[in-house]
Image: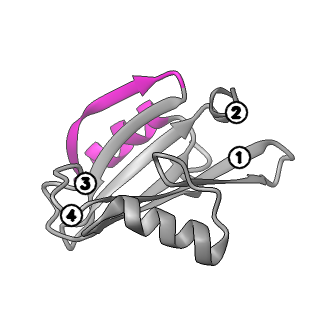
Amino acid sequence: MKKRVTGLGGIFFKTKDSKATKAWYGKHLGLPVDEYGCTFWWTDQNGKDASTQWSPFKEDTSYFEPSKQPFMINYRVENLNDLITILRSEGVTIVGDIQTFDYGKFAWILDPDGNKIELWEPIDSALKK
């Protein structure tokens, strides 16, 4: 396995009022927000389209659990199945099972401080539809 993390997939954070927060960022910073937040499109080092998601979550979301932090970072990865096998063998805490959607595969781990990290093997072309 050559690469593990290939880029930043997203930044997710809790907020008291996610709708108002998205509206504020849209109005004052010009982010083209939608119900999920904002998707930033860019080109990776191989010339392929890629994206990074910015998403405010409701303050009471359980999506970041078991972490108690008000944020979660999503990293883009290659070969998620192989990476999870390697991380498990290295003693990294895996949270739940790999989930597959039409826009990619997801898995979750905990860092040494107990922060939940989302790993995403993206299918960026599915997000542009």
Find disc 1 in the rendering and name its residue: 50
Q: As displayed, is residue 3 above or below residue 25?
A: above
Q: Is residue 27 magenta?
A: no
Mark 2 or mark 3: whose residue is earlier in sequence: 3
| The image quarter in which residue 56 lies | bottom left
Q: Residue at x 67, y 69 (%)?
A: 30
Q: CA distance from mark 4 to mark 2?
A: 29 Å
Q: Secondary structure at mark 1?
A: strand
Bounds of the magenta span?
Answer: 80-102
Q: As displayed, is residue 37 above or below residue 71?
A: above
Q: Residue at x 41, y 68 (%)?
A: 21
Q: Nearer the viewer, mark 1 or mark 4?
A: 4
Q: CA distance from mark 1 to mark 4?
A: 28 Å
Find disc 4 in the rendering and name its residue: 59
Q: Amino acid at mark 4?
A: Glu
Whole-percent x and y of residue 18? 35, 61
Find disc 3 in the rendering and name its residue: 92
| The image quarter in which residue 71 lies | bottom left
What is the crowding at mark 4: few (fewer than 14 residues within 10 Å), some, or many (at least 20)?
Answer: few
Q: Is residue 40 left or right of residue 1?
A: right
Residue 95 visible somewhere in the drawing: yes
Q: Is residue 88 magenta?
A: yes
Give the quadrant of the N terminus. Answer: top right
Q: Amino acid at mark 2?
A: Lys
Mark 2–mark 1 contact, CB under 8 Å?
A: no
Find disc 2 in the rendering and name its residue: 128
Q: CA distance from mark 2 to mark 3?
A: 33 Å
Q: Secondary structure at mark 3?
A: loop
